[in-house]
Image (cartoon, rainbow, N blue to C red):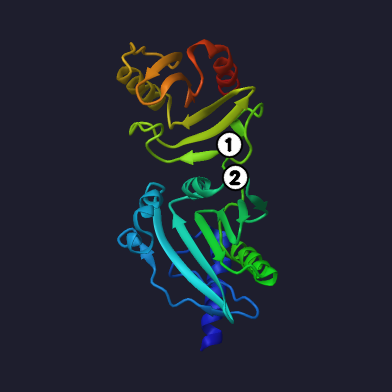
């Protein structure tokens, strides 16, 4: 009977990979790890009870459309490796939550779409899944086993292994590598600004941020820009494209531009640096 059950799970996994079926937490069958005793007898957390697991940190996961969390543990003597698999609504929100916890100083790994190792913690995302693996052990063999587990889980999970396509729209000049983010809601603290990609730039002594919001239509683009302009006291033009320098009460000087289905926002530059802002805006909107 156990053999039949394992075969059924394996067949379900294969079918899901080739047909795009999303695995729920209940469907996941995490891999074995040679020499370790695997335990999967853990509660599955959902939106209703995630705070029981990680307290107020759950709010960050909720802001990225968290769906469920499944866990497993691997023991070998006194050594323990913990596995957490968070499922989000899609590839973008999985990248978004992943990007909130990575640092450009991490040791990056070829895992899923992207992953990294930071002192015994291995995090990566693939498809709609954000995976966290950690151990407190400093033993080199245990650390290698944790990386081996990460590779096995990455192979097991379905979904895209590509970084979000919109990231390629950011100009390369001055961009700080591996600091890009996807912000699902409350961009720059504004409720009406959502689903934005962000990159950080350092050009000479200037450090500034560029945000790209891709909308569904030119009408949505104009409506969003109009709300922002109205809030900052600017006249609202009925135009499919525009460039403004505005004073945002929360964020200081903002360079705002829009065209077609794209909004570009630049923060961190002063009013007299419009030439720099225009350079980056024009490259994105061309």
Q: So how many labels did they put on this image?
A: 2
Residue 272 appears at what percent x and percent y? 52, 10
Residue 257 appears at what percent x and percent y? 47, 19
Q: CA distance from mark 1 to mark 2?
A: 8 Å
Binning the other alpha carbons within 10 Å of mark 2 as few (below 14), some (14 to 19) or many (20 upward) gives some
- Residue drawn where x is 37% and y is 54% of the image: 58
User: Which residue is identified by label 1?
Assistant: 167
**Residue placed most toward the observer, 28 or 151:** 151
Q: Is residue 31 above or below residue 181?
A: below
* Quarter where residue 245 is shown: top left
* Quarter where residue 24 is shown: bottom left
Q: Is residue 263 above or below residue 239?
A: below
- Residue drawn where x is 41% and y is 48% of the image: 64
**Residue placed most toward the observer, 10 or 80:** 80
Name the element at disc 2. loop
- Residue drawn where x is 43% and y is 70% of the image: 26
Q: Residue furthest bottom?
A: 1
Q: Is residue 211 above or below residue 247?
A: below
Quarter of the picture holding the C terminus: top right
* Quarter where residue 68 is shown: bottom left
- Residue drawn where x is 42% and y is 41% of the image: 184
User: Which residue is identified by label 2?
Assistant: 163
Residue 189 appears at what percent x and percent y? 36, 33
Query: As drawn, is 219 to the left or to the right of 13?
Result: left
Residue 14 appears at what percent x and percent y? 58, 67
Q: Residue furthest front?
A: 138
Name the element at disc 1. helix
Q: Are marks 1 and 2 in contact (CB under 8 Å)?
A: yes
């Amino acid at each position: 009977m156990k053999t039949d059950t394992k075969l059924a799970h394996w067949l379900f996994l294969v079918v899901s990979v080739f047909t795009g079926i999303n695995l729920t937490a209940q469907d996941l069958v995490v891999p074995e790890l040679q020499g370790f005793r695997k335990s999967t007898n853990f509660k599955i957390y959902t939106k209703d009870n995630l705070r029981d697991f990680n307290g107020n940190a759950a709010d960050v996961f909720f802001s990225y459309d968290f769906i469920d969390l499944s866990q497993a543990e691997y023991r070998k003597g006194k050594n323990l490796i913990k596995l957490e698999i968070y499922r989000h609504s899609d590839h973008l929100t999985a990248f978004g939550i992943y990007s909130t916890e990575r640092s450009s100083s991490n040791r990056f790994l070829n895992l899923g779409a992207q992953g990294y190792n930071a002192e015994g913690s291995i995090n990566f995302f693939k498809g709609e899944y954000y995976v966290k693996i950690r151990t407190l052990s400093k033993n080199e063999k245990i650390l290698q086993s944790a990386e081996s587990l990460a590779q096995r889980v990455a192979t097991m999970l379905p979904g895209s292994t590509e970084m979000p396509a919109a990231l390629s729209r950011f100009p390369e000049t001055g961009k700080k590598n591996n600091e890009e983010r996807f912000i699902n809601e409350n961009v720059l603290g504004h409720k009406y600004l959502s689903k934005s990609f962000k990159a950080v730039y350092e050009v000479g002594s200037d450090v500034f941020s560029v945000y790209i919001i891709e909308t569904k239509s030119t009408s949505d683009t104009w409506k969003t820009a109009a709300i922002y302009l109205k809030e900052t006291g600017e006249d609202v033009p009925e135009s499919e494209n525009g460039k403004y320098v505005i004073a945002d009460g929360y964020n200081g000087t903002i360079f705002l531009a829009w065209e077609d289905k794209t909004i570009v926002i630049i923060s961190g530059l002063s009013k007299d640096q419009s030439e720099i802002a225009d350079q980056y805006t024009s490259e994105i909107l061309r």
